[in-house]
Image (spheres, grey):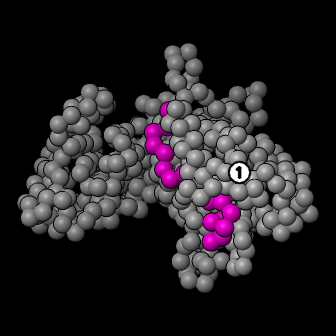
Amino acid sequence: MSDNDRLSDDRLRTHDFISEPHEYNPRRIYSKSATDHLGQVDFNRLRKDRLEKTRERMEEEGLGALLLFAGENIRYATGSYQGNWKYNIFIRYAVIPRDGDPVLFETVGSDLIRSEIDLPWIDDVRPAMTWRWAEGAEPMMAEKMADSVVEVLEDHDVADEPIGVDAYDQTAYEALQDAGLQLENAWNVMSKARVRKTPDELELLKLSASYGDGAMWRAMNEWTKPGIPEKEITAKVNEYLYSSGFDHVYDIIVASGGRTNPYGRWATDKILRQGDLVICDINAVGPGGYFIDYVRTWKVDADPTDEEIALYEQCYDQLYRAIEQLQPGNTTKDVAEEFREYDDDEHGSVSIQQAAHSIGISLYEGMWMSRAYSLDYPADIEEGMYFAIETFAGHEDLDQTVRLEENVMVTDEGPVITTLCEHPDYFTDHFDHRDYDFLQDQPGHGPA
């Protein structure tokens, strides 16, 4: 196991005065602005560690190089980013030779020049050959792309070795095959590299969670009023996060009243009414490129009914029992067993409503957990992993219902919840039981 795989004390910030490593405490976060007088996120170390982890996984799989098209993988391995719009449209790519420096292929014009200016740690930035939407010229342009890749591989004497590719379309696949390359699936290489976080990644994830808490509290306590449309809350969350320096804000889901069951995973101009339940799901990329993804449910200007309290408790109970299983040495099966039976069981597929998923530089990375397959195909849970875990209390014949989600890091001592916006006490004060022992030491989540 490498140093990057082992989050040992020499990689975590520790001091005799504090009871656990800085990175493992959600109350201990740095500001988003680096300075000369505070040791905060070290972006040079972050880029170095991520590239090193990528190369280690390449070595394990016996690959001569990686060819990356997915934007989040390119950013992970090279530290380059020019907006979310480039992530999945196959207009840029990167080659990571096993024993050489990354080569970035950037869209020509200002984008390429910006990369040369903005990325001093990358010595080799070349014009990307784009083939998508080229009509009849697609095969010709894809051939040029393949030739540009082969040139790098030949320069590093790995053109005859297995080459891992993370994602591509049929046109690119055919062009790379025609170029004589031995292609291997490298999606698992990048997933394994990314699923366990470095100390700097954990710091950035905590930072994103802190701003997510700020947005959620405002949505719950300031912006919710009878008569406003769901989209007004979405707009205000967007404004708050972008003004806080976020890279990108995804769909901020707001569903109210009857749109909570069945759950509508988007926002509309439906107005909030007194007595509505509101589900808010915040998905966004924080400063430094790491995600926040979590959910709260609250009531609009009315006391909850006994039925709504029971639904909230059902959702809450399975959520925290599942979180308690996020321990090194446990498996995804241990987590999935705590979810109640749902459509995942009936259809053998993933609803992403009773589930957990790794988050980091993208919303989904590393692994998902679901009763659809985790019970029979368990995967190990290890220190340094970071999850969004979510539960739902949807049933037939309900006018409205509850959904909840937390962000959780896995430490050597067990799970640590990083999303700290408290649950409304008009729900939790009425719970029959609160016997989640591990929550005793979780900030903002202790017993009522």
On screen, residue 44 above or below 107: above
Q: Callout 1: 10 Å neighbours few (<14), some, many (20+)? A: some
Left/right placement of residue 197 relative to residue 318 reads: left
Residue 140 appearing in the image: yes
Task: Name the residue rendered at 17%, 52% in the picture.
Answer: 130
**Does residue 38 show up magenta in the picture?**
no
The residue labelled by disc 1 is 226
Most extreme residue toward the front is: 227
Horizontal and vertical percent for residue 225?
Answer: 70, 47
Q: Nearer the viewer, residue 148 or 312?
A: 312
Secondary structure under the numbered disc 1 in the rendered image:
loop
Q: Is residue 326 left or right of residue 35?
A: right
Q: Amino acid at mark 1?
A: Pro
Most foreground residue, 246 or 271: 271
- The stretch in magenta equals 245-262
Residue at 55% across / 73% down in the picture? 350
Q: Is residue 89 left or right of residue 189?
A: left
Q: Looking at the rendering, which quadrant does residue 431 occupy?
A: bottom right
Residue 33 percent location from the top left of the image: 52, 24
> Quick check: can you spot residue 4?
no
Residue drawn 56% across and 23% down? Answer: 39
* Total number of numbered discs in the rendering: 1
Q: Is residue 260 magenta?
A: yes
The image quadrant of residue 237 is top right
Q: Nearer the viewer, residue 58 or 246?
A: 246
Q: Quadrant of residue 185?
A: bottom left
Kindly identify the residue that appears in the image at 78 percent across and 42 percent down: 443
Horizontal and vertical percent position of residue 42: 49, 29
Question: In this view of the protein, which residue sits in the foreground, 41 or 428?
Answer: 428
